[in-house]
Image (cartoon, helix red, strand yellow):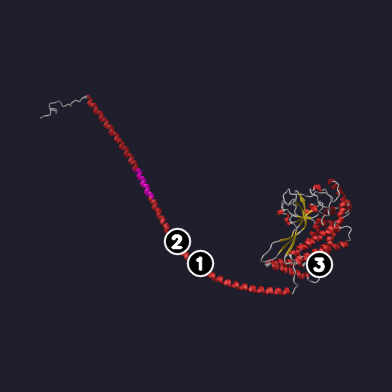
Amino acid sequence: MSNPFEPTDTDDPSPPTRPPDTESFGMKAEISIRQQILEELEALRKERDHLESELGEAKTWNQDMDDMLDERQKELQREEKKRAHAERQLQECRKELRDHKTQATRVQRELEQSTHQLSKKLEEKQKSEQRTLKQLNQARDHIFKLQPRRMDITETEAQEQFEDLYNRIHRWVTNRLEGILDELESGQLRNRPFAKPGAKRFLGLNSARATQNMWCDQSDEFIVIAAIMRFLCRAFFNQSFYCPLRRQGEESDAAHTIDRIEAAMRGVPRDAANCRDWRVEALTALVHEPGFIEHRANHDRQKTEELLTVLQPLVPRTDVQELRESIGKNIVRPAMDLAHRFQLAATIFSVRWTQFDDDLHCGTITSARYDMSCFTSLNVFLGGKIVEPAPGGHASENSLHMMTYLFDVAPGLYSQAVDSKNPTSLRNICKPKVLVTVGEGALVPPNEGPTLLQWIQSESERDETAPVGALKDVRVDEEKRHGKRKLGKPDRSKWGFMGGSRRGAG
């Protein structure tokens, strides 16, 4: 049966017509489908580009990784070569170490053998030295047995005799200066001359501190004591030997020769105790030579005359011969005897002044700044009474017991034992004696008028043609400056302390 809708040959070949609405809807659908396809194609193209970019990056990363792996492989190869080289060096070092150990063992064995041989030689040498030393000691003992036994002075004896010498001088000055101090107080001293050479020599025996405090009232006795002690130190105690060991007709002194030999012996070197012992024995032998006693007596007379020249003007109206004998008996000969015992002892004894006595750069010396316990302090206000230092040696600035140093009166005595095994340091056995003021603050006595030292200084500067009473002009000037007063009775209110009389030193 034929389909009524199939076209026939007799029908019009033109397409069948559609309704208008159906055709418009189909076109829209087709356009929409095309747009979707285009969008999908665009998305596929973007995805393709993105994948191609990632693929390029992956290829680049793979290439970098390949390069890195190649470099790492090269480094590993280099490290392997280094490790192999280090292994070879380690093996060589181990081999050298074994060789060194073998050599060290051999050297150690040789060293032990050499040490053993040297020890045996040293032991033999020590035994030989001991035998020689024993023989020398026996010979020395035999020689010394032929000499009288030497009785050295002990430190206790040295201290007692040095103090006794000072006390002798103190008593002599106190007793002998009474007349001239009376003249000084009464004003009669200006009319009496002091020989210029003796005056200059006396001034030369004063320290810088004593000269600085020459106007200090109540200090006259101590000025003279200090001058005598300084004379004895220069003449006897500070000499290589107190008496020149020069024979008649000889120019060289044997003491200087002994000094040179002793110095040469120390440079060899030799034991210090043996050097000192040799020196003492040599001096002992020389003082036992015939003629030494006479030579010492001549030296005694010479030094007595020198000291007499200095002290005679201070002791008016005294027989010169009696004064000469008094100086020799009480001052010169005791000092010579003590120096004799000091310098013929195995222990080294020395006398020393304080560090301040000739040094004015230290300024005012007070117990607030310095430890005064190492000195024997004599109070000038109380005629030389000993002042005990504050606890610990120091006092405060405002203390009523603060001490102010003026000058040295006597040096200190020191000892040093000469022992080769246990050398000892310098030891003080007699403190230096210093003159001080005591009061609140740094108390320095004011310039109150002429003193013995001021009179001696004016006489040393006086022209030989000038009248003896030239000191009167100085006295008048001082009275104008300080007001007229009776000498020896100063105004203590200016000192802040009531002191004793001028001759309060007993």
Look at label 2 and name its amino acid.
Answer: Leu
Q: Give the alpha-carbon distance from disc 1 to disc 2, as whole Å.
A: 20 Å
Residue under the image location 60 percent in, 72 percent down: 123
Can you give x and y, in whole percent of width and height, for residue 250 in the image?
79, 68
237 or 463, which is in the foreground?
237
- Give me the disc on residue 104: 1
Image quadrant assignment for residue 235: bottom right
User: What is the quadrant of the N terminus in the image?
Assistant: top left
Write down the residue under mark 3.
296
Quadrant in the picture for residue 222: bottom right
Relative to the observer, which residue lies in front, 122 or 434?
Answer: 434
> Left of 211 or right of it: where is 82?
left
Q: Are marks 1 and 2 in contact (CB under 8 Å)?
A: no
Marked residue nearer the N-terminal end (1 or 3): 1
User: How far apart are labels 2 and 3 at the CA level?
Assistant: 89 Å
Residue type for callout 3: Arg
- Mark 2 sits on what residue? 90
**Is 366 drawn above or below residue 90 in the view shown?**
above
Judge the density around disc 2: few (<14), some (14-19), many (≥20) Cα neighbours within 10 Å: few
Query: Is residue 250 placed above or below 477 in the rendered structure?
Result: below
Please, what is the dominant secondary structure of the magenta stretch? helix
Magenta span: 55-68
Is residue 89 rendered magenta in the image?
A: no
Say if 401 sits above or below 108 in the image.
above
**Mark 1, other Cα within 10 Å: few <14 / some 14–19 / many ≥20:** few
What is the x, y in percent for residue 329? 83, 64
